[in-house]
Image (cartoon, coloured by chain):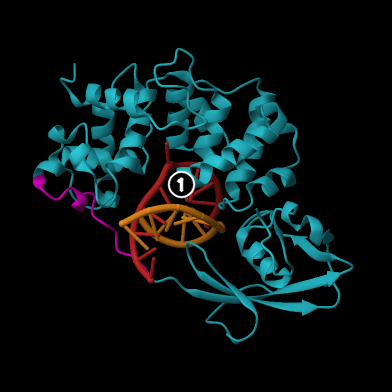
Chain colours: A cyan, B orange, C red
Amino acid sequence: MGANHQNRLLEFYRENARALPWRARPGSNVPADPYRVWLSEVMLQQTTVATVTPRFSRFLEKWPQIEDLAAAPLEDLLAEWAGLGYYARARNLHACARAVVANGGFPQDEAGLRALPGIGAYTAAAIAAIAFERDSVPIDTNVERVVARLEGIEGPLAETRPKVHAAARALWPAGRAGDYAQAMMDLGATICRPKNPRCDVCPICEDCAAFASGDPEAIPARKAKKVRPERRGTAWWIEKDGAVWLVRRPGKGMLGGMAALPGTSWEDGAPNDIDAPHVRHVFTHFALTLAVERRASPPGGEGWWQPLSSLGDAGLPTLYAKAAALMTGQPVRA
DNA sequence: AAACCGGGGGG
DNA sequence: CCCCCAGGTTT
């Protein structure tokens, strides 16, 4: 028992697994529900467990089975996704649900899963391993970090990734791929963290080359940060009879398909008038200063009057929820 | 290979 | 303030 790091890591998972609503209990005979595994994996793409957990539960209450999700209008799904970001995930989720239901269920192998919208190499391997007990190897940033440290593979992941992935495949235990993957996630999230790893309580530190080196945090090497450009624009607050005029953004690109305030396009540059009412919102690739101006009547084009009493149901992404909160003096989302 | 795509939590 | 997160798609 515990003669190798795989067994110690699986034991760690058995005894310390985080209780998460999409998981089967470790050691359970019943594998996790593919619908829940898929939904959780998509929500967790670039989004933290703390953010996802309550949203996952709400989502599942609304659409308990994938058939319910496939039958829902895309706009409903986007509204439920509001605030989670990366809205292409929600559009792909909808397309994927419809494809899965049309085919009578999820493909149970990695290649079949990989062909579905929004399911890339990682997510396909994760679903295959966790929901279908296949010997696939889901490699995410947690796994990359843990394996790079374990094997002492120095340098930035952009350069070492092929070596790290090969090492991961070599050490992945056959027959336990799903539990091992989730053990890796938990270890990476709670112990083998990017900064301040807790090697003092790590179940596999004695196998770890980075721990032996005395500076585990140096692996993997940090990548150089780049400057974030500034952009500016104006949104229009058009209020009449207790309702505000909203529009739907184009189906692709920034905030694609989401409900929004109408306004100008966004241009490069710092804000023109910092004293005018505005909101700040920082996206991955730029920071936006959005001035909010009152207008008397809607511009041309499609849109709808959203009652202020139900503004929270409109599914505004965070940028526009901030702008609406500025104008109404009340928070827009719960 | 690199760019694009949100948002929030934590150090 | 900076950093990072259970990535996928497009160019």
Tally of marks: 1
Whether residue A219 is in magenta: the answer is yes
Mark 1 Cα-neighbour bin, 10 Å: few <14, some 14–19, many ≥20:
few
* Front residue of this view, candidates A157 and A283: A283
Q: Locate the N terminus of chain A and report the quarter of the image it occupies.
A: top left
* Front residue of this view, candidates A290 and A251: A290
**Compared to A221, does A52 lie above or below?**
above
Q: Residue at x 66, y 33 (%)?
A: A61
Quadrant housing residue A168: top left
Whether residue A299 is in magenta: the answer is no
* Predominant secondary structure, magenta span: loop
Q: Residue at x 40, y 32 (%)?
A: A18
Extreme-left residue of the structure: A213
Quadrant housing residue A10: top left
**Compared to A288, does A176 lie above or below?**
above
Letter of the chain that mark 1 sits on in the rendering: A
Residue A267's x, y, as percent? 59, 76
**Compared to A72, does A248 lie above or below?**
below
Residue A58's x, y, as percent? 63, 39
Q: Give the residues drawn in magenta, as a range.
A: A213-226
In the rendered structure, the answer to whether residue A62 lies left or right of residue A3 reads right
Q: Residue at x 65, y 53 (%)?
A: A334
Q: Which residue is mark 1?
A: A48
Residue A63's x, y, as percent? 68, 32
Extreme-right residue of the structure: A241
Going by the numbered disc 1, the residue's amino acid type is Thr
In the rendered structure, the answer to whether residue A194 lies left or right of residue A20 reads left
